Amino acid sequence: MVLAAAPVSLPSPVFAAALPCVFFWSVFRPAAMSPPVIFGLGLLLDLLTLAPLGAGVLVLLGVHGVAIRFRRFLARQSFLAVWMAFCGAALGAAALFWGLQALLALRLPPFAPALHAALLSAGLYPAIALVLARLHEAMRQAETAP
């Protein structure tokens, strides 16, 4: 998230980098992604994106809750099914983030950055999931090694 916050002329990919990680670990290794960890990541997200404090926390905790709720179903599905579920979660998370920013700022911000963040997050998910899946498998092998 910190690397994604580097100042560039493009919209900030911090949200798009955090969301796939929270979703992936919540589905495949929920013990590693506990609510206090997500609270800290959400707070960091708010600070890096200059969003109202608490908006990123609620969004990431919401995504975590949805992923945990459907964890047993998603863990047995193909990559494409999990990716499609993530795309829906990313759209919902971006809409919630936009709504919280509108509520806390008492004005309607443009919706295009929220849609861009959701689409960027959905597009980055396969690459991030590939890296995290290999890391997850390495962790699983290390746990079962004699």
Image (spheres, rainbow, N blue to C red):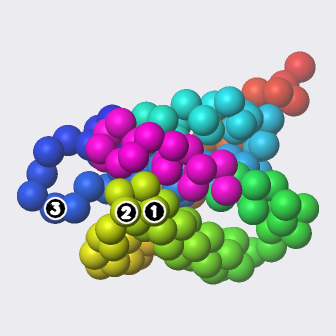
Mark 3 or mark 2: whose residue is earlier in sequence: 3
Q: Nearer the viewer, mark 3 or mark 1?
A: 1
Badge 3 element: loop
Q: Nearest the camera: 100 or 60?
A: 100
Residue under label 3, please give it: 10
Which kind of residue does numbered mark 1 sit on? Leu
Which kind of residue does numbered mark 3 sit on? Leu
Number of numbered markers: 3
Which class describes the residues within 10 Å of circle 3: few (<14), some (14-19), or many (20+)? few
User: Marks 1 and 2, how far apart in space?
Assistant: 5 Å
> Residue 69 appears at what percent x and percent y?
85, 61
| Rendered view: 138 above or below 14 | above
User: Marks 3 and 2, how far apart in space?
Assistant: 26 Å
Q: Which residues are magenta?
A: 46-62
Residue under label 1, please give it: 103
| Rendered view: 29 above or below 95 | above
Badge 2 element: loop
Q: Is residue 136 left or right of residue 106?
A: right
Q: Quadrant of residue 57?
A: top right
Residue that extends furthest to the left in the rendered view of this protein: 9
Residues at circles 3 and 1 in contact by the CB criterion of under 8 Å: no
Residue under label 2, please give it: 106
